[in-house]
Image (cartoon, rainbow, N blue to C red):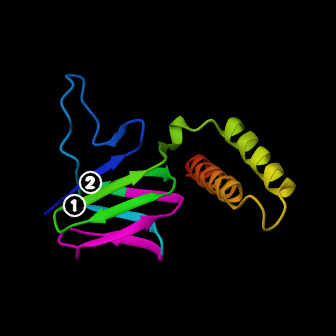
């Protein structure tokens, strides 16, 4: 018995996708593995209901024995017995990641973090740390895909 997966960012619905005719796919998957606030969280059909935060990292879902990995940013996850809804600030496939651009963004973020004074500008520190985590998640997925 599959479960329904929905992944949405502020820009687009990432999964399920539309086919060539513009019809939305079913979104049915066999399992989901995601980076939750307390570590990796595996979700199978009939999972107990749960709402948790999503941490930057890799989200994997399986359909018919084939796995798909996405780099995800921060967000929220709602799990019901029927499915999983992910609301995140980033969800990207390894093929869409520009490794050089992400490396440059990571270096800029690290430089910005080093220039901030401790105890000051907490919102800016949080934003820079989030950028570092998102960039690291993207690079990890891209480099993992390259070695597989």
Q: Is residue 130 magenta?
A: no
**Residue holding disc 2:** 5
Q: CA distance from mark 1 to mark 2?
A: 6 Å
- Side (left or right) of 39 relative to 77: right
Above or below: residue 41 compared with residue 107 = below
The image shows residue 44 at horizontal and vertical percentages of 25, 69
**Which mark identifies residue 83?**
1
The local secondary structure at tag 1 comes to: strand
Dominant secondary structure (helix, strand or loop) of the stretch shown in magenta: strand
Q: Point out the stretch of residues depicted in magenta.
A: 38-60
Q: Quadrant of residue 26?
A: top left
Compare residues 27 and 84 and report the one nearer the observer. Answer: 84
Q: Residue furthest top?
A: 21
- CB atoms of marks 1 and 2 within 8 Å: yes
- Side (left or right) of 9 relative to 44: right
How many neighbours does mark 1 have within 10 angstroms: few (below 14), some (14-19), or many (20 or more)? many
Q: Earlier in the sequence, mark 1 or mark 2?
A: 2
- Side (left or right) of 94 relative to 77: right
**Which mark identifies residue 148?**
none
Q: Is residue 42 magenta?
A: yes
The local secondary structure at tag 2 comes to: strand
Compare residues 80 and 59 and report the one nearer the observer. Answer: 80
| Whether residue 9 can be seen here | yes
The residue at 42%/41% (across/down) is 10
Compare residues 103 and 62 and report the one nearer the observer. Answer: 103
| Whether residue 68 can be seen here | no
């Amino acid at each position: 018995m599959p479960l329904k997966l929905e992944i949405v960012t502020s820009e687009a619905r990432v999964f399920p996708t539309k086919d060539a005719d513009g019809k939305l796919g079913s979104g049915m998957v066999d399992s989901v593995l995601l980076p939750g606030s307390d570590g990796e969280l595996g979700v199978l059909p009939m999972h107990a209901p749960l709402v948790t935060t999503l941490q930057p990292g890799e989200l994997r879902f399986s359909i018919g024995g084939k796995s798909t990995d996405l780099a995800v940013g921060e967000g929220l996850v709602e799990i019901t017995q029927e499915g999983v809804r992910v609301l995140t600030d980033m969800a990207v496939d390894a093929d869409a990641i520009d490794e050089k651009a992400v490396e440059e963004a990571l270096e800029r973020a690290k430089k910005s973090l080093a220039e901030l004074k401790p105890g000051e500008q907490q919102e800016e520190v949080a934003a820079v740390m989030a950028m570092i985590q998102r960039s690291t998640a993207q690079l990890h997925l891209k480099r993992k895909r390259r070695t597989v």
